[in-house]
Image (cartoon, rainbow, N blue to C red):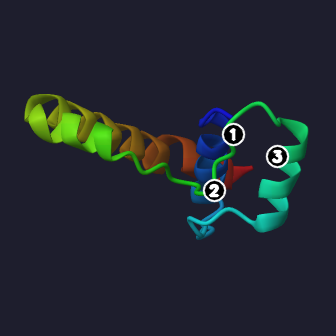
Amino acid sequence: MTVVPRAWSIFLARMLDVELKNELPDDWIEQVKKEVPNEDTPYLLWDHDDKSEVELLSHPEITKKMIDYNKELKNLCDNEYLPNISKR
């Protein structure tokens, strides 16, 4: 199971100003296990990967670029996309 469906869920929730819990619903987890039995089923909306955190902490220049990019993306959503959706 890729991160894409969860990423779109987070994006949609942000647009609708909805708070999401990090824990995915049990019924959703069971459904995914049945429909996609050969893949790892996520239990959390936000992945937590200690290995990637260690990598990021080992390379602060990459971490800064990612943080800056995410800030720019958030500003774009807040200032361009969300206001246009609200106008409809």
For disc 3, the neighbor class at 10 Å (few under 14, some 14 to 19, many from 20) is some
Q: Secondary structure at mark 2?
A: loop
Residue mark closest to the camera, 1 vs 3: 3
Q: Amino acid at mark 3?
A: Val
Q: Amino acid at mark 2?
A: Tyr
Residue mark closest to the camera, 1 vs 2: 2
Where does residue 47 sit, x and y in percent of width and height? 48, 49
Q: Secondary structure at mark 3?
A: helix
Precedes in sequence: disc 1 or disc 3: 1
Q: Which residue is mark 2?
A: 43
Give the distance between the C-alpha atoms of the residues marked 1 and 2, in whole angstroms. Answer: 13 Å
Q: Amino acid at mark 1?
A: Pro
Where does residue 33 sit, x and y in percent of width and height? 82, 46
Q: Secondary structure at mark 1?
A: helix
Where does residue 52 sit, x and y in percent of width and height? 31, 37
Give the distance between the C-alpha atoms of the residues marked 1 and 3, in whole angstroms. Answer: 12 Å
Q: Which residue is mark 3?
A: 32
Give the distance between the C-alpha atoms of the residues marked 3 and 2, in whole angstroms. Answer: 10 Å
Choose top left, top right, bottom left or bottom right for residue 53: top left
Residue at 49%, 41% (x, y): give it. 80
Q: Which residue is mark 1?
A: 5
